[in-house]
Each structure stands twice: as structure tokens, then as C-alpha cells.
Amino acid sequence: MNILYSLPHPADSLDSGQAGHVIRATALLGALESLGHCVQRVEAAKSGSAKASVSLYRNYVKKLLPRPLALRLRDRMRIRHGERYAQKLLASIARQKPDLILETHIAFSRAGMLASRASGVPLVLDDVAPAWEEEQQYGVGLKRAAHVIHREVTAQARLLVAVNQTLRQHLLADGQPAEKVIVVPNGIDASLFRADLDGAPI
């Protein structure tokens, strides 16, 4: 299968290896390739405009404006960023002719949805959580937009992948059909560990 992987986060890239969603995505893509699938990677953070937007927010907006105003401006920037990034996805789709788009779900990003809708290529969203999780963890400036966009992108996706049963249950409670939400749990790379060594001294 020919898979177009999309990471719409404006700051995190696969080679950074820091954020949890990046570690998860890297492992999933490696596993898919080991099974014989072809995976083409597209990352928003690789573009100059994304880097400039992140720098603007972190160095000026976040430091100089009151937090509620900074969050609202950040969320507007994220929505606009997703719309621009969707064009990059569409260009990659035209070149690669993928069988599906696999995208790490990022709050406020409509990129995968827009690309899927315009191209007809099915969308699979990974690491999906309910809309309220973003507000709990990081804060949200545009609460209504967060919920509207979450509903739009999850409606467009052919399949939603949660990282545990609890999040799956929350998605079902939000109205997602049971057959559309699966669980692929986070795990470990067993090759990094030595079962033949005694860990007791440590």
C-alpha cells in the first residue's frame, strides 16, 4: 500500500524525536514499512513559513500579550497554517498517488480533511483524542472553533485511531460510530532492551 503520512504540527518534526506524538508516529511508520508498505512523509514544520509563525508566537505574541489574547491569536494562526499546509498535501498527493492519507491528529488542523475532501483519498487520523483534551492540557483561545474543527475532521476521516480504551470511550461518547474508532496502544521498542541482562543492580 502507498501511504502518504502527514504531520501538520507547525513546530514538531519526525527527526526531532522529542514529543510523544512524534515518537509514536516514527514507530508506527517504521512498523508499516517493515510490513512492506511504502510511506511518503510530509511535515509542516519543514517549511520556512511554519518556522517563522512558531518563532513569532513563541518570541513575541506569547511573551508580550495577555494569555487569553495570545491563545486566541495562536489558534487563528494554527487554523490558517492548516489551510496553507493542505495545499502542500494536495501537491504531494498529485505526485505520489497514495492509497490513503495517514495523519497525526493536531488540534485546529483541517489539513488532512481538506486534502482528503479535495482529492478523494481516504483519511486515517492517528492519536485522536476528544476536543476538550487540548483545552485541559495546553489551553484553548477559540473554544467553539476547536469543537467545530474537531467535528469536521473526525467526520471526514474514514478511521480514527486512539491510543487507549479510555480515549476511545470518550470518542464514542462524543458520537463517533464504534466501527470507526480503533485502539492502537502506545508501547515500547523491544529491540532497545536486553532481556539477558540482570537489571537488579540498577
Image: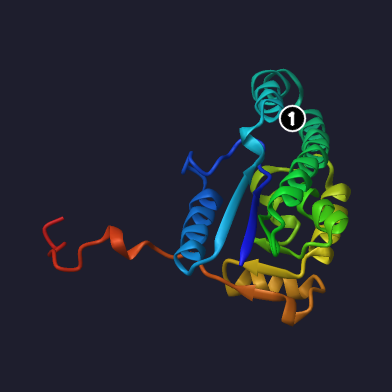
Decide which of 200, 114 is in the foreground and name it: 114
In the shown orientation, is residue 22 left or right of residue 114? left
> From the image, which quarter does the N terminus lie in?
bottom right
Q: Please name the residue that numbered disc 1 is placed on.
A: 67
In the shown orientation, is residue 91 left or right of residue 63? right
> Percent x, y for residue 142?
84, 42
**Residue 70, placed above or below residue 191:** above
Report whether residue 108 is seen. Answer: no
- Label 1 residue SS: helix
Decide which of 32, 129 is in the foreground and name it: 32
Neighbours of disc 1 within 10 Å: few (<14), some (14-19), many (20+): some
Report whether residue 58 is seen. Answer: yes
> Percent x, y for residue 47?
66, 31
Query: Residue at the location (78% across, 36% down)?
Result: 81
> From the image, which quarter does the C terminus lie in?
bottom left
> Percent x, y for residue 118?
87, 54
> Percent x, y for residue 11?
61, 35
Query: Residue at the location (77% across, 74% down)?
Result: 173
Decide which of 96, 73 is in the foreground and name it: 96
Query: Residue at the location (49% across, 53% down)?
Result: 26
Kind of residue indicated by mark 1: Arg
Tell me where residue 163 sits by quadrant: bottom right
Tell me where residue 100 sits by quadrant: bottom right
Q: How is the image coloured?
A: rainbow
Q: How many marks?
A: 1
Tell me where residue 148 sits by quadrant: bottom right
Decide which of 44, 182 is in the foreground and name it: 44
